[in-house]
Amino acid sequence: MKPQIYLDVDNCVADFSLHVTRTVKSQLDSDYAECLERSDRGGMTWEETFGMSDDAVLAMAHAEGHRWWESIPEVADRFKNAPRCLRLHDAMKGLGKVTFLTALPKTGPEFAAHGKANWLRTRMGSKFTDFIFCMRRHKALLAAPNRVLVDDSDENCEDFTNAGGCAVRYDATAFAHLPNEAAAIEYLSKAVRTALRSPGCPVTLINKDKR
């Protein structure tokens, strides 16, 4: 049976960190670049990142409704050699069945679901349906030994592997040392193959410039 590959959307193909930091920029008490760096790093609450509650951040985002989610730029627009959504999806299909698996916020999930579906269909085609929307904590319910989660969250990867699946910790900065996008896709493909051989142990993409 072919492996199942679950691709996260936020910060793997859609630059959520940049978009949300731009949205709250006018309300920031600290330096914009520092807030963006904290947002990119992940593992922090929005209170810690921006000095704002989740409800306050989402209220600003959802003033635009689903259009806010539709207008998120691609990760590849900012990070050198990061694969574009369509090319990443098509390359992963050579390894198994590919489904986008993305979490919805507790506040305004209807806006996020509508906007994320349109975001994906803009890039994948108007009839594209290979995506699953769920709460973050429910991603691990899909874990199994022949299933790989590619996600930028350490917590999500750990939960998925603890539930019996495989995971690759995605880092959009990990491709900068490579010559081009094709090499980045091959690097990620190798990580997915390694993860499938090592269920229960997340594989992390390494940014060699940070070592």
Image (cartoon, rainbow, N blue to C red):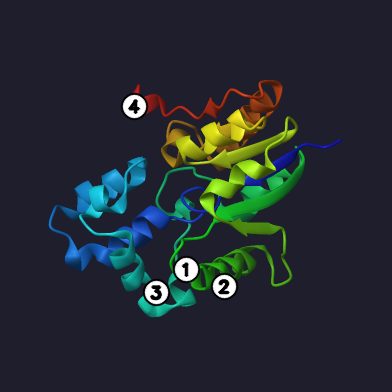
Instruction: Count how many numbered circles sit on residues in the image.
Output: 4
Q: Earlier in the sequence, mark 3 or mark 1?
A: 3
Q: CA distance from mark 3 to mark 1?
A: 9 Å
Q: Examine the image and state in which quarter residue 202 appears.
A: top right
Disc 2, SS: helix
In the rendered image, which residue does mark 3 sit on?
Answer: 62
Q: Give the residue drawn at x 36%, y 67%.
A: 58
Q: Amino acid at mark 2?
A: His
Tag 2–tag 3 contact (CB < 8 Å): no
Q: Amino acid at mark 3?
A: His
Q: Compared to 209, does 131 lie above or below?
A: below
* Residue neighbourhood size for the residue with mark 1, other residues' Cα within 10 Å, grouped as few (<14), some (14–19), many (≥20): many
Closer to us: 174 or 60: 60
Q: Earlier in the sequence, mark 3 or mark 4?
A: 3
In the rendered image, which residue does mark 1 sit on?
Answer: 69
Nearer the observer, disc 1 or disc 4? 1
Point out which mark residue 210 bears. 4
Q: Compared to 76, does 119 lie above or below?
A: below
In the image as oriented, which residue stretches furthest toward the left?
29
Q: Earlier in the sequence, mark 2 or mark 3?
A: 3
Q: Earlier in the sequence, mark 2 or mark 1?
A: 1
Q: Amino acid at mark 1?
A: Trp
Q: Amino acid at mark 4?
A: Lys
* Residue neighbourhood size for the residue with mark 2, other residues' Cα within 10 Å, grouped as few (<14), some (14–19), many (≥20): some
Left-right relation of 176 to 112: left
Point out which mark residue 189 bears. none
